[in-house]
Amino acid sequence: MDIEEQVADSSGQAGLGRAGAVVKDVADKAREKLASYREGGLDQVSEDIVDYARRQPVTAILIAAGVGLLVGMLLRPGRGE
């Protein structure tokens, strides 16, 4: 059962109609973006990253810093071991 079927099953439950619709919209957008990346390859991905960094430079810098911090923590040898 894929995510769309799960959302369709749960959207009938009380209180989940709106949330189910939001999840379905996000899943549809993610599916469309993934399809465009499959067609465009790495060039499309890099264009989207550059475009995002130009539109949201502060956020892009914070994301890069966070990723760098996590990678540094993962690659740093253990202390005292």
Image (spheres, grey):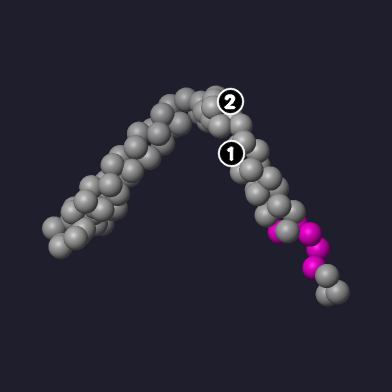
**Residue corresponding to mark 1:** 59
Side of 40 relative to 15 (left or right)? right
**Nearer to the camera, 42 or 24:** 24
Within the image, what quadrant is residue 65 found in? top right
Q: Position of residue 12 (x, y in %)?
A: 13, 58
Q: Is residue 53 visible?
A: yes
Which secondary structure dominates the residues rendered in magenta?
loop
Q: Position of residue 73 (x, y in %)?
A: 73, 58
Up-down relation of residue 77 to residue 34 (above or below): below
Image quarter of the N terminus: bottom left
Task: Tell me the amino acid under the disc marked 2.
Answer: Arg
Q: Residue at x 35, y 34 (%)?
A: 32
Side of 9 relative to 47 (left or right)? left
**Nearer to the camera, 28 or 69:** 69
Side of 8 relative to 3 (left or right)? left
Q: Residue at x 65, y 48 (%)?
A: 67
Say if the magenta span includes residue 24.
no
Image quarter of the C terminus: bottom right
Single out the residue that lies furthest toward the right: 80
Q: Residues within 10 Å of mark 2 (few under 14, many from 20)?
A: few
Side of 29 relative to 55 (left or right)? left
Q: Residue at x 21, y 58 (%)?
A: 16
* Stretch of the chain drawn in magenta: 74-78
Q: Earlier in the sequence, mark 2 or mark 1?
A: 2
Distance Cα–Cα, label 2 vs label 1: 10 Å
**Residue corresponding to mark 2:** 54
| Callout 2 touching callout 1 (CB < 8 Å) | no
Task: Tell me the amino acid under the disc marked 1.
Answer: Thr
